[in-house]
Image (cartoon, coloured by chain):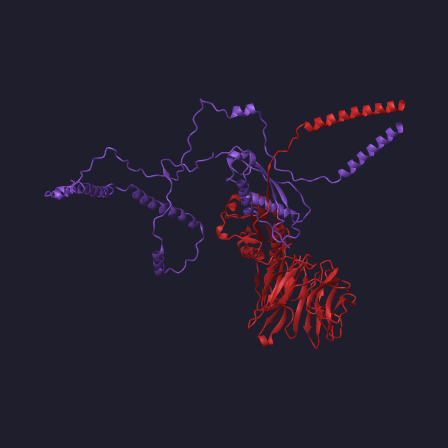
Amino acid sequence: MLKSDSALSCLVLNRRALLVGTAACATALAMPIRHAAAAVRLDVTQGTIQPLPIALPDFVGATPADGDAARGMSQVITANLRRSGLFAPIDPAAYIEKVFGVDAAPRFEDWRAINAQALVTGRLTRQGDGRFKVEFRLWDVFAGQQLIGQQYFSPADNWRRIAHIISDAIYERLTGEKGYFDTRIVFIDETGPKERRVKRLAIMDQDGASVRYLTRGDDLVLTPRFSPSTQEITYMSYGQGDPRVFLLNIETGQREIVGNFPGMTFAPRFSPDGQRIVMSLQQGGNSNIFAMDLRSKTTTRLTDTPAIDTAPSYSPDGARICFESDRGGSQQIYVMTASGGAAQRISFGEGSYSTPVWSPRGDYIAFTKRGRGSFGIGVLRPDGQGERLLTEGYHNEGPTWAPNGRVLMFFRDPGGSAGPALYTVDITGRNEQRIPTPSYASDPAWSPLLS
Amino acid sequence: MKMGLTISVVAHAAVLLWAVVSFGARPYNATPPDSLPIDIISVAEFSQMVAGSKTAAKAPAPKPLVEKVAERKPADNPAAKVAEKPEIITASALMPESQPAPKMSEPKPAPQAKPESKPQEVEKKPDPKPDPIADALKKDDSKKPEAKKEEAKVPTPKKPPEPQPKFDPKQIEQRLALLDKRDAQRRAATGETFSPTPTLGASTGNAPRLSQNELDALRARLAQCWNLPAGAADAKDLNVEVQMLLKQDGSLSAEPKVLNRSANPFFQVAAESALRAIRTCAPFNFLPVAKYEAWKDIEINFNPQYMFRS
């Protein structure tokens, strides 16, 4: 009985506690909950994709003699930014504020009136030892603040490179991606009538300036490629007998044959660390992919099929290789690990795919697609999804990526008596531009950033 | 008895515990509905509010829609002179030698002549009176094309000079011949004083929220000014939340502030583009001043993920 009494008394206590608890909860719930200040909330999911209006007044020369070099630099920077398609330089005739200095802040209201969203001011001074000192500032006009301020010292004849470096800095600060202006293009320069073209290896700045020839044109040269780490170019040349892969050092001019293979070797490409070259070697009617270490000269066979496997390209992390193969009956793109092994097909569209190139950002593979009577340059993701064509026409071929993975360069042969020319297109498919070359040009390869 | 009680209590507790654990597993997520401001009033208060007062000022009658001030028409003079009527010569007067036989028909030609003369009178009446309606129409037409020409002149100086097409006078003549030269059918509603507001409804509402139209207008303006970086990789988590404080005239009262952070390397550029959009678009002078309390603090979420495909 005692136990039951205690049990009951426990229950009563529990019940009382329960009642008190529920009453407390009820009062707590009954109190009004204070909302935060009700601000209007708005979702903006649409915007306009337009080139950013930017004002680039001429750089100021400290003396009138420097004025020419300063103006030249401004023109190079303006042309670079306009060609990228992401900037719209404003016509200098529209500027309201006419006196520009690097030291004082500009009058932002004048620049806002012409809707310049960014402004670049700069000054060039010739130092006592003949070098140039270049200072520039990038301003955000509507915020009224400076975004970058830098100065560079350079030898007098290197002013173009400084202009490209400044363009890169502006591009990177305003779009968030690394620039691609301080780079060079190596390509095959073609001269002469169509039956007897003279093909020479040439190198130039990415805007078409400072063209330099690297071979004399006695032998036929094809598919030059840049090394990612050193100043070396690998290319294929029809020397004596079979075509061979050569390695050329740009600065010293030294040339060596890569490997000593019986048979033809072609389509060479560097690995991202610059230590290996991967190429395809033809034996009989069969072509397979080999990798060769440049220092130790050891070669490794990566594919072993009776089909034609060629045009290999490393992924930017060096772990995978994409290549073209016709083991399935038509030329398609396959991906395998860098040590060889099983390959997966990733291209499944209509037509045949060739010359796959992996983007330096790793998110796309560019290719040449041939089908329905025309050639096209396109991109697809490494898993095969999201294939789209960027340009189409009679004979577009040979895509190569800019170092930031945003722009593709290729060559287009219009047919007939005219020869091929180099074009660039943005990865969104817009802004196709022609790169001026002294004569016909083909097979471009984009160098990594020089700085 | 004791054992039965304890077993019963334990069993009940176990069932309750199991119920609490198993039924409370997944909370039901319902989207919260938009909050409405609600005032709870008693019936007496309500009837007091709508009672009205006999001594209050009379509400103005709704004005008719007037789009342009009318021409002053000459008022009709009620004391008009009676026009001299021509003498009515009846048929019976024309034929004084009436035969006794058609005496019966005499009264017939008499009433017949009268209705004949009456239509003559009626026909003459409208002619002398000037036609004010036709005059007003002609004046309207002459004024409308003038107004239109002024408007057309203003936007053209803003456009940059375009290359002129080859000037061919013959083509112009041909095209002039094809122009519709009829008078315009629609006439502007005319009245004494200009009042463009529609008759029904008041211009200021008492809702403290922005209407959907105003929100859409604000969204469209921001979308126009928002210049976003194209082709950025990983555009998924690039949404930027910005807090914008406005003054009564729609201009910014403080620098817009970015409220969120992201590890994405493009976030700084996306945030700058959002801030630049707000600064370029300001002032937002189309927002109604009467609802200033509703829009003085706006939180905008710039979300580019629907614009990037593949």
Judge left or right: residue B22 versus residue B196: right
Q: Nearer the viewer, residue A191 or B281?
A: B281
The answer to whether residue A192 of the structure is visible from this angle is yes
Q: Residue at x 68, y 27 (%)?
A: A30
- Residue A447 placement, left or right of B110: right
Residue at the spot x=42%, y=50% of the render?
A: B156
Residue sitting nearer the eye, B242 or A29: A29
Chain in red colour: A
Residue drawn 31% across and 45% down? B138
Left of B31 or right of it: where is A69?
left
In which image quadrant can residue B131 be found? top left
Q: Residue A375 sits in which quadrant?
A: bottom right
Residue A371 position within the rendered picture, expressed as x and y whole percent measured from the top left: 62, 67
The chain that appears purple in the image is: B
Q: Position of residue B81 (x, y in %)?
A: 21, 35
Image coords of residue B19 (percent x, y): 78, 36
Q: Which quadrant of the figure contains the C terminus of chain A?
A: bottom right
Tell me the quadrant of the picture where the N terminus of chain A can be found. top right
Count all numbered tags in the image, as a single digit. 0
Q: Quadrant of residue B59?
A: top left
Q: x%, y% of residue B101?
A: 13, 43
Can residue A146 be seen in the rendering of this structure? no
User: Depth check: B15 or A292 in front?
Assistant: B15
From the viewer's perspective, is residue B238 above or below residue A406? above
Q: Most extreme residue toward the front, as rendered?
A: B101
